[in-house]
Amino acid sequence: MNKGFGVTVTVTQPGDQEAKTAPLVVVARDERDAELVAAQAAGPNASAETLRELTQEEVMAYELDLQAHGSAKVLPILNL
């Protein structure tokens, strides 16, 4: 069964002095799967860290479809 997770993704592009970090919510099976989904969505120079599993209320607020494994949404700010 899929769950919703809050994840931060860090992307370091070659030549950039600073990495860019973005918060995401993703649909995945577990924390490790959430990190893989988020890193894959962000590209080859990305790493991800799961912050926590979302509550049912947060899943509904972010309009996540738990049947859609691998879906991800970028958040404008980290509000987890």
Image: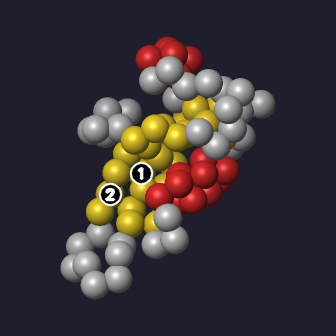
Give the colouring mode of the picture: secondary structure
Which residue sits at x=51%, y=71%? 44
Percent x, y of residue 65:
62, 24
Task: Check disc 2 and report the residue beneath it.
Answer: 21
Kindly indicate the quadrant of the structure image that contains residue 5. Answer: top right
Seen as rendered, the residue at the extreme left is 17
Q: Nearer the viewer, residue 55 or 37?
A: 37
Seen as rendered, the residue at the extreme right is 1
Percent x, y of residue 18:
23, 73
Circle 1 packing at 10 Å, graded few (<14), some (14-19), many (20+), is: many
Q: Left or right: where does residue 16 sit relative to residue 1? A: left
Q: Relative to residue 67, is residue 56 depicted above or below?
A: above
- In the rendered structure, which amino acid carries the disc numbered 2? Thr
Task: Check disc 1 and report the residue beneath it.
Answer: 8
- In the rendered structure, which amino acid carries the disc numbered 1? Thr
Q: Say whether residue 55 is visible.
A: no
Percent x, y of residue 47:
48, 65
Q: Earlier in the sequence, mark 1 or mark 2?
A: 1
- Secondary structure type for disc 1: strand
Percent x, y of residue 3:
65, 31
Q: Left or right: where does residue 65 sit relative to residue 49? A: right
Kindly indicate the quadrant of the structure image that contains residue 27. Answer: top right
Q: Are marks 1 and 2 in contact (CB under 8 Å)?
A: yes
- Secondary structure type for disc 2: strand
Query: How far is disc 1 from disc 2 in space, using C-alphas?
Result: 7 Å
Which residue sits at x=34%, y=51%? 22
Q: Say whether residue 5 is visible.
A: yes
Kindly indicate the quadrant of the structure image that contains residue 53. Answer: top right
The quarter in which the N terminus is drawn is top right
Circle 2 packing at 10 Å, graded few (<14), some (14-19), many (20+), is: some
The quarter in which the C terminus is drawn is top left
The count of marks equals 2
